[in-house]
Image: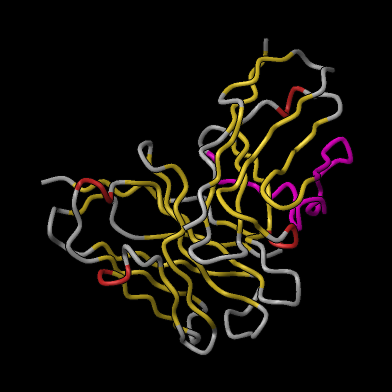
Amino acid sequence: EIVLTQSPGTLSLSPGERAALSCRASQIVSSSYFAWFQQKPGQAPRLVLYGASTRAAGIPDRFSGSGSGTDFTLNISSLEPEDFAVYYCQQYAVSPWTFGQGTKVEIK
Amino acid sequence: QMQLQESGPGLVKPSETLALTCSVSGASINNSSSYWAWIRQSPGKGLEWIGSVYYLGSTFSKPSLKNRITMSLDTSENRFSLKLSSVTAADTAIYYCARRLSLPFLRHFDHWGQGILVTVTS
């Protein structure tokens, strides 16, 4: 199965700063089938991006994604208080669909 | 607005069968544009896709769990179900149901239930 490795494990930033989260796949993944999720404590994961760069409904444009092949990035241009959460990458190109272990974005 | 809601026992004894149901509102499960999925989350394994069932009843599951999983649809009640047999402590997790789209280039998991914690304990 495809293993997704996210880095860093924790990102300590202040509101207004830019966040860059990385996800590396153990083999090439079609960017058409790559997603990012946001999860807050006690809540289900919430879709942020799909197709590597398309924002899901209701996601503000400070969230953007890029990447291809084995390397993908989620960028948050200017962190708002509600953006502090854990972010997971996911591939749904090759079964079994797999998730990364998560990057926690915490308030510095 | 589609909503999914998991239900079932929160405690299961080792070696028994975990049984969960996901009730769907705001959309019919009897449509060709959706797969209905189960995903779990545990501290040790993170987020793990368990399996999916299509509206025709065909099922797809993670190979390591395939022998223990049964999934089904109840179109009359607009819900789908998961059974996981021979559970151990390693099956303790929050179980989520979710909808995965089945459209050209749109195959992502866009709607999730709130999750239900299932603990395997004697």
Query: Taking B112 as reference, is B63 above or below it?
Result: below
Residue situated in front as seen by the camera: B95 or B90: B90
Residue situated in front as seen by the camera: A69 or B31: A69
Query: Taking A91 as reference, is B53 above or below it?
Result: below
List the single residue furthest toward the top. Answer: A108
List the single residue furthest toward the bottom. Answer: B56
List the single residue furthest toward the right. Answer: A61
Point out residue B23 in the picture as x, y percentages from the top left corner: 49, 68
Point out residue B65 in the picture as x, y percentages from the top left corner: 31, 64
Give the quadrant of residue B102. Answer: bottom right
Point out residue B36 in the picture as x, y percentages from the top left corner: 53, 71
Give the quadrant of residue B42. Answer: top left
Identify the colour scheme used: secondary structure
The residue drawn where x is 67% and y is 9% is A108
Range of residues picked out in magenta: A43-66
B102 vs B74, left or right, is: right
Query: Taking B29 as reference, is B66 above or below it?
Result: above
Q: Per the image, is A12 magenta? A: no
Give the quadrant of residue B4. Answer: bottom right
Point out residue A89 in the picture as x, y percentages from the top left corner: 62, 45
The residue drawn where x is 63% and y is 85% is B31
The residue drawn where x is 65% and y is 57% is A29
Query: Taking A106 as reference, is A3 above or below it?
Result: below
B107 vs B84, left or right, is: right
Q: Per the image, is A51 magenta? A: yes
Number of numbered discs on residues: 0
Residue situated in front as seen by the camera: A83 or B117: A83
The residue drawn where x is 80% and y is 31% is A76
